[in-house]
Image (cartoon, rainbow, N blue to C red):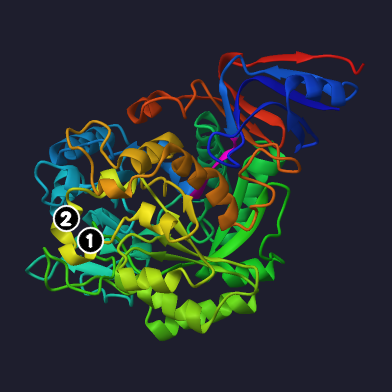
């Protein structure tokens, strides 16, 4: 027995403007689509539930192609700095937080971005010490490629003044040689993060529950998430995913990117690419090749325009990178390489050309922001998908123009160019780096402008159509995990995953997209979110 969905604008995403009047789904699969009269007649004996969409808009389920689900949940649970546009506001919030927190307890805050402050001077160790030496304080930058701590946190992590800088990481100092509390990239940040208390399964489950509940409200039916290395290792994190999604019934299609340092643990536990549970599957091996533009650690082929002494950080040498790619190939896995800078992008292409994936698999280049034209010509010949974050355009401009050499920036953030060249692109948020709401990413792809800014936008020639933008989060996300023949469209045999909006997203002006609200989220034919029963449900006996 199955479900009849009708009386709405049902966009299939097969091609632009393609709609059907009704569809019938059963046992988590779309059985058929067509006119309402046809569906009623053809499946009269099997319809046990009818969903009246009441004129609202149904799409294939939206999927975020790149996020950190546990991290998003942490952000919801912790002090959020991302909307604070002045360093004084952050310092004031920290004072208030410390005043209400018992001495000795850690204070962890998320999301500072000095590029949005009126005074861009960083908050460092001495200023944090002035707020409290009784609480270990950790402030994570919005990109999560940098954090700053106070002396109490250094003491708790047993980090001495003479601490040596790890390969691939940066430990920053004051001019007098003292540690200034700023740590960049995971190899350095983990010296602090490994000492954080309370990272147990209950903690991870609480964060996951918050994150998935938020995802459902935003219309997301799934996400490609990278979490398995950061929360006491592979086993506790994977068990938390299974507990929340499978055992507690919070259905969400989670494709788990496997951090390269978690690969052996996954294999030892019997995990394999595209295997797992009903809703949780292991995906590509995640490799970081560089850092972030904001932290001057994204690896460029030329020095930064505002810091001529550096061109970024190579997390691995080219030989080391190929070693990890070879590890992925031995496990029959594609790779998902974080590459923001053009030189990091080049290193990844070199590795893929030398060690291509198994036939039928696609590697993905995550972010693909600073890219030289000749690198695109190489990429289009390879089995690669670009995993882009449209929300980075309004977030990174105009400050990125001061950091990245102009001739490199000219061919970067070039989403339309990528699509025109035939490169498949998937769309994500990189939450908690950017807000999880897919509508914000779609609006950014279409307008390339800030929500509340006066500017006309950045690189307007690279704007996408609304159809192209939604395709990033439907067909593109499906292709990134090799599921383009069962997800991303409303079509016979495809999974019954749907997102329902309160307005027709293809019939409004671009700025009016921001008013669109997800009112129903359906996963595997199960309604996981329904805002005030916005769609009328009726049940009836089989005829």
Tell me what residue is drawn at x 74 percent, y 20 percent.
36
Residue placed at 58% from the left, 39% from the top?
13
Query: In this rendering, is residue 457 above or below 283?
Result: above
Assess whether mark 1 and mark 2 are in contact (beta carbons under 8 angstroms): yes
Residue for badge 2: 401
Badge 1 marks a residue whose secondary structure is helix
Examine the structure image and report whether residue 530 is included in the region drawn in magenta: no
Q: Is residue 200 visible?
A: no
| Residue 74 figure quarter | top left
> 100 left or right of 518?
left
Residue neighbourhood size for the residue with mark 2, other residues' Cα within 10 Å, grouped as few (<14), some (14–19), many (≥20): some
Please identify the dominant SS of the magenta region: strand
The structure residue drawn at horizontal position 18% and vertical position 43%, both measured from the top left corner, is 116
Instruction: Name the image quarter holding residue 495.
Output: top right
Would residue 65 appear left or right of 110 to someone viewing this image? right
Q: Nearer the viewer, residue 30 or 36?
A: 36
Q: Nearer the viewer, residue 62 or 151?
A: 62
Marking on residue 259: none
On the question of residue 324 being in view, the answer is yes
The quadrant in which residue 44 appears is: top right
Q: Position of residue 412 (x, y in %)?
A: 29, 59
Query: Which residue is at a point 32% across and 67% down the rendered structure image?
Result: 188
Q: Where does the image place residue 37, in percent across and percent down from the top left?
A: 78, 19
Q: Name the spot of residue 166 as percent of width and height, x first.
A: 32, 75
Nearest the camera: 229 or 273? 273
Residues rendered magenta in the picture: 60-65
Please tell me which of labels 2 and 1 falls first in the chain.
Answer: 2
In the image, residue 457 above or below residue 404: above
Total labels drawn: 2
Q: Bin the neighbour count of mark 1 within 10 Å (Cα to Cα): few under 14, some 14-19, many 20 and up.
A: some
Q: Position of residue 290 (x, y in %)?
A: 34, 68
**The disc label shown at residue 409, or none:** 1
């Amino acid at each position: 027995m199955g479900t009849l969905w009708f009386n709405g604008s049902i966009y299939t995403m097969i091609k632009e403007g393609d709609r059907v009047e009704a569809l019938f789904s059963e046992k988590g699969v779309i059985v058929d689509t067509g006119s309402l009269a046809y569906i009623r007649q053809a499946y009269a004996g099997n319809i046990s539930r009818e969903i009246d969409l009441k004129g609202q808009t149904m799409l294939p389920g939206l999927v975020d192609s790149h996020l950190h689900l546990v991290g998003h949940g942490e952000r919801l649970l912790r002090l959020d700095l991302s909307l604070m546009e002045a360093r004084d506001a952050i310092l004031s919030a920290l004072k208030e937080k410390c005043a209400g927190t018992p001495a000795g307890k850690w204070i962890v805050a998320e999301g500072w971005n000095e590029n949005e402050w009126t005074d861009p001077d960083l908050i460092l160790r001495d200023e944090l010490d002035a707020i409290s030496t009784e609480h270990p304080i950790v402030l994570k930058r919005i990109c999560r490629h940098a954090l700053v701590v106070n002396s109490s946190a250094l003491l708790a992590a047993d980090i001495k003044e003479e601490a040596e800088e790890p390969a691939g990481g940066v430990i920053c100092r004051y001019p007098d040689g003292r540690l200034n509390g700023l740590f960049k990239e995971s190899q350095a940040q983990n010296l602090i993060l490994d000492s954080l208390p309370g990272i147990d399964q209950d903690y991870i489950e609480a964060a996951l529950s918050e994150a998935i509940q938020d995802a459902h409200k935003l219309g997301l039916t799934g996400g490609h998430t990278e979490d398995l290395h950061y929360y006491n290792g592979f086993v506790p994190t994977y068990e938390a995913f299974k507990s929340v999604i499978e055992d507690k019934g919070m259905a969400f299609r989670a494709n788990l990117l496997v951090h390269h340092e978690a690969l052996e643990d996954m294999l030892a536990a019997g995990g394999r690419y595209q295997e797992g549970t009903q809703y949780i599957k292991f995906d590509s091996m995640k490799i970081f090749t560089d850092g972030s533009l904001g932290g001057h650690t994204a690896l460029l082929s030329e020095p930064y325009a505002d810091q001529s002494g550096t061109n970024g950080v190579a997390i691995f040498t080219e030989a080391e990178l190929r070693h990890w790619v070879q590890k992925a190939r031995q496990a029959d896995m594609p790779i998902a390489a974080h590459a923001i800078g053009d030189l990091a992008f080049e290193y990844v292409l070199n590795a893929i050309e030398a060690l291509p994936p198994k036939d039928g698999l696609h590697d993905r280049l995550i972010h693909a922001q600073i890219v030289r034209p000749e690198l695109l010509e190489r990429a289009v010949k390879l089995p690669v998908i670009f995993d882009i974050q449209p929300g980075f355009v309004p977030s990174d401009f105009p400050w990125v123009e001061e950091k990245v050499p102009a001739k490199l920036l000219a061919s970067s953030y070039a989403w339309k160019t990528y699509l025109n060249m035939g490169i498949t692109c998937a769309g994500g948020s990189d939450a908690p780096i950017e807000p999880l709401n897919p509508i914000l990413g779609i609006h950014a792809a279409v307008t390339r402008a800030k929500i509340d800014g006066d500017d006309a936008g950045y690189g307007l020639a690279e704007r996408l159509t609304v159809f192209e933008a939604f395709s990033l989060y439907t067909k593109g996300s499906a292709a990134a995990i090799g599921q383009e023949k069962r997800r991303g469209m409303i079509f016979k045999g495809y999974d019954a995953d749907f997102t329902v909006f309160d307005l027709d997203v293809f019939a409004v002006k671009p700025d009016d997209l921001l008013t669109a609200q997800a009112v129903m989220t359906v996963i595997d034919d199960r309604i996981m979110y329904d805002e005030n029963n916005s769609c009328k449900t009726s049940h009836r006996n089989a005829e």
